[in-house]
Amino acid sequence: MKMVREMSAYCPKCNKHTDHSVKLYSKGPTSGLKIGNRRAVRKRTGYIGKVKGQASVKKLAKRQKIMLTCKVCKYTVERVVGSRTKKKLEFNIA
């Protein structure tokens, strides 16, 4: 799916349409010490513990998410592009 590097979009902080720079959202590294991860590991330990928490259906596609950064006030908003798609976002050079 082709995407432009710059686009005009609504900025809630400026309260008007301004030029935004577009960047693909990338999730940061997750910490293994958070309470949810510790709880899940504790549930899965022991005899036949690995069955708990495994997904029965694998999703074939991801929802593409982009980050829009306002060029006037530098406010960043995330936006989901389309629905679930297998195609990755690629940005035009121009």
Image: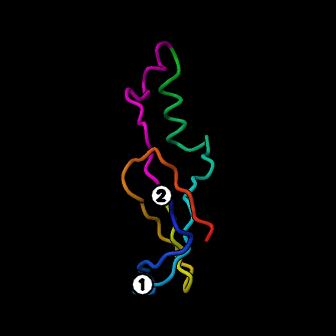
SS for dot 1? strand
Which residues lie in the magenta part? 47-65
Q: How far across and down, in percent of the image, does residue 75 sit?
A: 52, 77
Residue 59, above or below 73: above
Residue drawn at the location 57% of the way across and 52% of the way down: 27
Q: Which residue is mark 1?
A: 17
| Relative to 63, 6 lies left or right | right
Q: How far across and down, in percent of the image, does residue 9 sit?
A: 43, 77
Q: Quadrant of the C terminus?
A: bottom right
Residue 32, above or below 70: above
CA distance for labels 1 and 2: 20 Å
SS for dot 2? strand
How crowded is the residue under tag 2: few (<14 C-alpha within 10 Å), some, or many (20+)? Answer: some
Q: Is residue 51 magenta?
A: yes
How crowded is the residue under tag 1: few (<14 C-alpha within 10 Å), some, or many (20+)? Answer: few
Contact (Cβ within 8 Å) of mark 1 with mark 2: no
Depth check: 36 or 16 in front? Answer: 16
The amino acid on which the numbered mark 2 sits, given as a three-letter code, is Lys
Of the two numbered discs 1 and 2 on the same chain, state the one appearing first in sequence.
1
Residue drawn at the location 53% of the way across and 38% of the way down: 37
Q: Which mark is residue 65?
A: 2
Residue drawn at the location 49% of the way across and 24% of the way down: 44
